[in-house]
Amino acid sequence: MLSLDGRVALVTGASRGIGAGIATALAEAGAAVVVNYVHDQRAADRVVRGIEAGGGRAVAIRADVSSPTDVSSLFAAARGAFGVVDVLVNNAGVYSFAPFDAVSPQEFHRQFDINVLGSFLTMREFAAAPEADGGAIINLSTAGVSTLSPFTALYAASKSAITAATVVVARELAVRDIRVNAIAPTGSDTEGTRDMGFVGSPAHERMAAEIPLGRLGVPEDIAPVAVFLASSAARFITGEVIFASGGHR
C-alpha cells in the first residue's frame, strides 16, 4: 500500500461522493485529512467519524472555495489542526446540463466560480506556503472534456479550463517540486447523481453503454488514483490528466 504517513491533505467538497471517497482513501494511506464542506456539516462529520473509526485523523472545516476570505481561513484552520497542507485535492464542483442557449448568466457564474475560480484560489493559497515545496495538487476534471456530449457545454467548458490550468500551473510550480495533476472521471454513481435522478435513468443506461468497461464509475474507482498521485510513487509525474473513466473518452 502506498504510504502518506506524515502528510496533511485537504480535500474540497469532501462531504459526499468522490470527495468523501478520496478523503477516506488518503486517510487510510496515513495522511491527516481536512474534510472541506460548504452546506452539509452532518455529512462531513460522518466522513470524519468514519476516518477516525479506522484509526485515521480528520477534521471537517466549512468554507466556500469561491470566496478568497473563506479559502484563506480554510488553510489557516487546516494548519492549526494538523500543520502545513502538502496535498491539495480540488474536488468541489457543481454541474447542470442543458442546451447551450438555455444557460443563464447566473448558472454560468455559479459553475465557473466554484469549478474554476475555487480551484485557482486554493492552488494560490497552497502555493503561498513556502513549506509546500515538494507537495502535490490534484484537480478533478471530467472525461467530458474529451467526450464533449450535447448539453454539457457549460460544465465541459469549466472543466476544460481547470484541465488546461493544471498543465500550466504544473510548469510554473515545477521549480518548487510541487506536482500538479488532474483526474478525469466519467459519469459516476454517487449521492449527487442519485439525487438528480440520473442513476437508473435511460441516460444512465446510454452512458454505461458508451463506457468500454460497461458501467458508471464509483468513488472507489477514483480514490486510489488520487492516493497514487499524492504519493512519492508519482514523484516524476506532473502536468498530466489521468482518465479514470473506464475507457470513456
Image: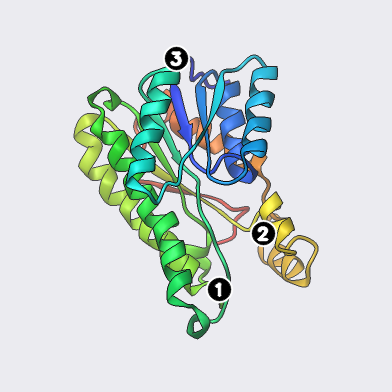
Relative image position of residue 35 (x, y in whole percent) = 54, 33
Q: Residues within 10 Å of mark 3 (few under 14, many from 20)?
A: few
Relative image position of residue 47 (x, y in whole percent) = 65, 31
Q: Amino acid at mark 3?
A: Gly
Find residue 6 and name its label: 3
Contact? badges 1 and 3 (CB < 8 Å): no
In this view, 173 is above or below 191: above
Label 2: element kind: loop
Inter-mark Cα distance, 2 to 3: 38 Å
Q: Residues within 10 Å of mark 1 (few under 14, many from 20)?
A: few
In the foreground, 32 or 221: 32
Q: Nearer the viewer, mark 1 or mark 2?
A: 1
Q: Nearer the viewer, mark 1 or mark 3?
A: 3
**Residue at left offset 39%, top offset 41%:** 70
**Sooner in the amino-acid sequence: mark 1 or mark 2:** 1
Inter-mark Cα distance, 1 to 2: 16 Å
Find residue 212 and name its label: 2
Q: Decide if residue 223 is in sight here.
A: yes
**Residue at left offset 60%, top offset 29%:** 25
For the N terminus, give its image quadrant: top right
Contact? badges 1 and 2 (CB < 8 Å): no
Inter-mark Cα distance, 1 to 3: 41 Å
**Sooner in the amino-acid sequence: mark 1 or mark 3:** 3
Q: Amino acid at mark 2?
A: Pro
Relative image position of residue 179 (x, y in whole percent) = 33, 35
In this view, 116 is above or below 175: below
Q: Amino acid at mark 1?
A: Ser
Side of 68 where 225 appears, left or right: right
